[in-house]
Structure formats: structure tokens, C-alpha cells
Image (tube, helix red, strand yellow):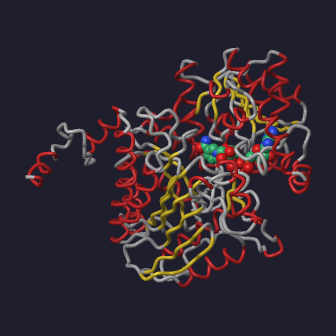
């Protein structure tokens, strides 16, 4: 772990002053600072997901900052697992930063080997957006969670979650978005969390309404909200491995059940029943096997309860934390009867490369986000997902760190929005440049057979070529930062993903970067799903002129096989 004594508090720079040699470099530096400003444990450089770090250690962080301050616009900084390695002369259209974080060779991609390398200071897990400097606080996943709830409402509850009870756990860096997503979907949501400071942090941030340490009081509040059909979020101080079985034992059946604790990591993440986080830290040091065994047994009890809720009629889903995988390893044979959220609720969106796009106002001025919100409401009026979300987010999602917005847009729309914003920057109608990025959990950017790519139509769940191609294509497409990540901790061996950031600094050059990188980033996403046999993706490619090559001997969709045949002849 990092020596906390090297820490000095980090807050992202605001305003129009440049510290670097250009806005592209300055943007990336502010984004790095911003992930730490929003992170869960800045002293340890931990941003979210229990171990997801922004940089290897404090000397590495400082060296990255120094290098960004000096970096010329025709140079590329190379980063390996959160540590800067070197600067290379490239050219002004090349990425300023490329990075590879936590990629282990197949047979060695195990959590044991990862922990060993981490201990030796040779590797970090970068989460998805932590080490790629793209984390924007809990709001990074809030629309995703909200769209899951909306989808469940449509599929199961006549389009309406008023009067419905959602049970979940975990109020950390990402899970902290759940209470606000729940109330935006108008449900009554109960969130179980072990340490009180996490509950307090979400209340302070405006994501959570009430807290209690009494299960009875929590259930009374929820029952009252259900009767009145009003939205409510309650943080309950407790352990999910105790509360879920207790509720199942009492015959309480929520309408929707999930969990977003750090169940993927039994050593650093999930707190076993009967433990405090401090006790978990002690046992981690003295007897790590015992801690993992206790955490595994607790996860198993929690998942047994989730299965009981499902049996009793609740909609139960895995919210992307590998809880089913851990439960299966610890003896719950039926764990995979629980659906994964991507396949169950969001795949039709991903198949059209509609996913978690985001933009960050580098000036620090929240008015910039409002100007962009207004633009979207005016110019994307026929995009129901965008308009509905921007209205809600504008009214209810608080600012965290540098003002930012998540917005699920697809192919073509991302580019259209980014070019319009670049124009606004150029015309001086925003206080400063804007960075565009996205979650790695996006159409072409992630292989994770237990989360993103579970049960793909063609069985290509574990093929990691796609995120690697995505990253290489983004480098060729003039993106400003490109990252390749694989899983660490409990995710070691489970995933590979790619991240991308492009800066709208108002220049004509950035028009070209934004157009090329954003079109190609979503373009390969559409083709990934088309290749897997999703009809909607084939249609999307055709409708939007994404050049798809079919290699099955039949005529291809864009008529280019004719050209290929001419060349062959
Ligand atoms: P985090 O480590 O910041 O927070 C996890 C929280 O769970 C902590 O506050 C911890 O105290 C709490 N917790 C641990 N054990 C508990 C227990 N037994 N009962 C109740 N609370 C408990 O992690 P995070 O960033 O919030 O991410 C949570 C999980 O979600 C991770 O596994 C992460 O990989 C996953 N994730 C999913 C998505 C997605 O798109 N669905 C996105 C990001 C993260």
C-alpha cells in the first residue's frame, strides 16, 4: 500500500489558466487530478471499486504531473500500470498519453499473482476509469443504473416504479449512485452499507436521503413510501450478508434486488458478516486466507438470500460486481440463475453502441454543463433517452469535482454533440474546453464474460480481441488518451477493456480528432455486435454507413464486395 505520509491533498485545477504547454495536456492533467478529488481514499490513490487506483504510488503520480507540465504536443507519454515510463517524439495527431494497466499473461492472470505483484509495487489495478483518469464520481454510473431500473419498470411493472421496493447494498465509489438512480426512477430504495462514513458521504453529496442503524425503522420508512407511492432512499447501517438473509427469513419480498458491494474482491473489498472494516484490515494482515474464506461464506449466504427473493417473485440481478462468480466458487450452485444487468436489460442499447458517454467542463464552471444540457434538449429533442435523462440530471444530479455529465448516446450522436460543443468553445460561449470520454463498459471496449459479454449470441464472450482493436483504432484515430486495462484483485483473469479521451479545445484540429475518434470508437462497437449476430447492429451499421466487411462469402451490406472482387481479379 501507498505510504500516506507522501500525500498532499489534491483538487483539480479550475479556471482558464494554463499550466501545461497546451489545453490537451492541461485537460488530461485536470482529469487525473479530478479522479483523485472524487476518489474514495485519496491518501492511498484509491479511486473506487476497493482497489482501483489512479497511479502506482505518490512518486509515480508526481512524475506523471511533472511530465504532463512539460509535454509538447507532438510527444506521447507512455504509462505502465500507473507509472510513467518514457516520452517519445510522435506527431501532433498522435495520442498524448497511451497506457496499459494490469495486463497479465493468461496463465498468470490470477488474483494471487496480482496481489503478489501489487505488494512488490510492480502493478496496480486501474479499475476501468481510475487509472485512465476518466472517473467523474458516482455519477459515472448513475444513468446506467437508472436505465436498468427503467428497463425493469417497462418489462415487469407497467413502466412505473412508484410504490416499488428496491433492495441493494454498497454505497461506495460506484454503488453510491444507486440511491439517487432509485429515487429518480421514483422507487423506494434501501441500501445496506457497513461503515457509516460511506453513508454520510452519500448524504452530503446529495445522493441519499435518510440513514438509520435500525432495520425496523428502515422497513417502516420504506413501507410508508410504498403506501404513498413516493420516491425515497434509505441507507441502512448493516451487513448485506446478515440483512438479506434476515429479510428473506421474514418473508419480506422486495420488487427488485441487487447488490453493488465490492464482492469481486474478497481480500480488499467485501466485508464478511461480523467484521468491521478495521477488523478486516487486521485479519488481512495476519491471516489473509481466513479473511477470504469468511468473505466467501458471507457472499454465499447473501446470494442464497437473493435466490430466495427471486424464487418468491422479485426481479434479481447482478450489478456488475462478480457476486455470482464468488458465490459459485463458495458453493452456491444456482448463483448463475441470477441475471446479469447487461444481458438482461441493456444489451439492445449496447448493440447500437448507445452507452455511457461523458463530458467534463475543464473550466470548473457548472454553467458550461448547463449550456450543453440546453443544447441537447434543443437539438436532440427526438432522442427520448437523452432528453429524459438530461432533464432529470439537470434538476437532480449534484456536481462532484469538475462539473461533468454522463449521457447515453450512440454512433453519430456522440460526434454531433462533441463537434457542437467544440464550436461553443471556439465561439467563447463556454468558460473553457471540454473533455469527452466514456466508461470502458461500452459496446466495443470491453470483454468480460461475467458482466459485459455474458451470453453473447455467438458465444464470443471471452474474446478479448475487441477491446484491443478498439484501443488500437482509437490511437489511429487521433484520440488524446488511450488506455488498455485488464482485471486485478478479484477480477484478475476476468476482463480486458479500453478507454479513450478526446479534448474539445475549440480548434479545427480538435474537430478532426473528435470526428474521427468518436465515429470510430462507436463504429467498432456496432461492428462488434454485428459480428456476433445482433440484427439491430447490422441495421445500425447499414443505416449509418459504417463500413462492415462480411467474410462469409455472401454479398456484403454496403456493396463493397464488388470492389474486393475487382481487386482480387
Ligand atoms: P467501493 O469499494 O468504492 O465500494 C464498495 C462498498 O461496499 C464499500 O463502501 C463497502 O463498505 C461496502 N461493502 C462491502 N462489503 C459489504 C457488505 N458485506 N455489506 C454491505 N456493504 C458492504 O466499490 P464501488 O466502486 O462502489 O464498486 C462496487 C462494485 O461494483 C465493484 O465490484 C465494482 O467493480 C462494480 N462496478 C460495477 C459497475 C457497473 O457498471 N455495473 C460499475 C462500476 C463498478
Write the residue at 28% across / 47% down: 546
Q: How many numbered marks, from 0 up?
A: 0
Image x and y of residue 455, in percent: 50, 32
**Residue 301 placement (x, y as % from top left):** 80, 29
Please say if 237 is above or below 41.
Answer: above
Above or below 292: residue 500: below
Q: Nearer the viewer, residue 408 or 564?
A: 564
- The structure residue drawn at horizontal position 66% and vertical position 40%, both measured from the top left corner, is 322
Please tell me which residue is depicted at 81% across the width and 45% down the height of the picture.
292
In the image shown, does 183 or 526 lie closer to the viewer? Answer: 526
The answer to whether residue 543 is visible is yes
In this orientation, does residue 203 appear? no
Determine whether, in the image, residue 28 is placed left or right of residue 51: left
- The N terminus appears in which quarter of the rendering? bottom right
Residue at the spot x=77%, y=45% of the render? 266
Left or right for 91, reference 312: left
Q: Position of residue 60 (x, y in %)?
A: 67, 75
Amino acid at each position: 500500500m501507498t505510504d500516506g505520509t507522501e500525500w498532499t491533498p489534491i483538487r483539480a485545477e479550475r479556471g482558464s489558466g494554463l499550466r501545461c504547454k497546451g489545453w490537451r495536456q492541461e485537460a488530461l492533467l485536470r482529469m487525473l487530478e479530478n479522479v483523485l478529488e472524487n476518489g474514495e481514499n485519496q491518501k492511498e490513490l484509491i479511486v473506487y471499486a476497493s482497489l482501483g487506483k489512479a497511479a502506482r504510488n505518490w512518486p509515480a503520480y508526481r512524475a506523471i504531473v511533472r511530465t504532463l507540465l512539460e509535454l509538447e504536443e507532438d510527444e506521447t507519454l507512455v504509462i505502465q500500470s500507473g507509472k510513467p515510463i518514457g516520452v517519445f517524439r510522435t506527431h501532433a495527431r498522435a495520442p498524448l498519453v497511451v497506457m496499459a494497466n494490469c495486463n497479465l499473461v493468461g496463465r498468470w492472470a490470477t488474483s494471487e499473482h496480482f496481489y503478489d505483484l501489487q505488494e512488490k509495487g510492480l502493478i496496480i489495478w486501474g479499475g476501468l476509469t481510475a487509472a485512465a483518469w476518466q472517473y467523474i464520481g458516482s455519477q459515472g454510473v448513475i444513468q446506467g443504473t437508472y436505465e436498468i431500473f427503467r428497463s425493469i419498470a417497462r418489462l415487469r411493472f407497467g413502466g412505473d416504479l412508484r410504490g416499488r421496493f428496491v433492495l441493494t447494498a454498497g454505497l461506495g465509489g460506484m454503488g453510491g449512485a444507486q440511491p439517487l438512480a432509485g429515487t429518480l426512477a421514483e422507487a423506494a430504495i434501501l441500501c445496506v452499507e457497513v461503515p457509516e462514513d460511506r453513508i454520510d458521504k452519500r448524504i452530503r453529496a446529495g445522493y441519499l436521503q435518510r440513514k438509520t442503524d435500525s432495520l425496523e425503522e428502515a422497513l417502516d420508512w420504506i413501507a410508508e413510501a410504498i403506501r404513498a407511492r413516493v420516491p425515497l432512499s434509505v441507507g441502512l447501517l448493516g451487513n448485506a450478508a446478515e440483512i438479506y438473509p434476515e429479510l428473506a427469513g421474514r418473508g419480506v419480498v422486495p420488487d427488485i434486488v441487487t447488490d453493488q458491494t465490492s464482492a469481486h474482491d474478497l481480500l480488499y473489498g467485501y466485508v464478511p458478516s461480523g467484521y468491521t472494516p478495521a477488523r478486516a484490515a487486521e485479519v488481512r494482515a495476519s491471516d489473509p486466507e481466513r479473511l477470504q474464506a469468511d468473505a466467501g461464506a458471507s457472499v454465499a449466504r447473501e446470494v442464497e438470500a437473493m435466490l430466495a427473493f427471486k424464487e418468491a417473485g422479485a426481479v434479481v440481478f447482478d450489478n456488475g460486481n462478480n457476486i455470482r462468480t464468488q458465490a459459485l466458487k463458495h458453493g452456491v450452485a444456482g448463483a448463475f440463475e441470477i441475471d446479469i444487468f447487461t444481458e438482461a436489460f441493456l444489451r439492445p442499447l449496447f448493440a447500437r453502441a448507445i452507452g455511457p458517454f461523458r463530458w467534463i467542463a475543464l473550466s470548473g464552471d457548472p454553467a458550461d454543463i448547463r449550456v450543453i444540457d440546453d443544447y441537447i434538449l434543443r437539438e436532440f429533442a427526438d432522442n427520448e433517452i437523452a432528453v429524459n435523462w438530461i432533464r432529470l440530471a439537470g434538476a437532480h444530479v449534484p456536481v462532484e469535482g469538475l462539473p461533468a455529465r454522463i449521457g447515453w448516446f450512440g454512433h453519430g450522436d456522440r460526434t454531433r454533440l462533441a463537434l457542437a460543443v467544440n464550436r461553443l468553445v471556439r465561439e467563447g460561449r463556454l468558460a473553457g474546453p471540454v473533455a469527452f470520454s466514456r466508461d470502458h463498459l461500452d459496446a466495443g471496449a470491453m470483454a468480460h464474460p461475467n458482466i459485459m459479454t455474458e451470453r453473447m449470441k455467438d458465444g464470443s464472450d471471452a474474446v478479448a480481441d475487441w477491446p484491443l482493436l478498439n484501443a488500437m483504432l482509437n490511437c489511429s484515430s487521433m484520440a488524446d488518451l488511450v488506455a488498455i486495462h485488464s482485471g486485478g484483485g478479484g477480477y484478475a483473469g476476468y476482463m480486458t477493456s479500453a478507454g479513450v479521451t478526446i479534448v474539445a479545445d475549440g480548434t479545427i484540429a480538435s474537430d478532426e480528432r473528435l470526428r474521427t475518434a468518436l465515429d470510430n470508437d462507436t463504429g467498432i462497437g456496432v461492428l462488434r455486435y454485428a459480428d456476433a449476430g445482433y440484427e439491430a447492429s447490422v441495421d445500425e451499421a447499414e443505416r449509418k454507413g459504417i463500413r462492415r466487411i462480411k467474410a462469409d462469402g455472401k454479398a456484403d451490406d454496403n456493396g463493397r464486395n464488388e470492389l474486393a472482387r475487382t481487386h482480387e481479379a
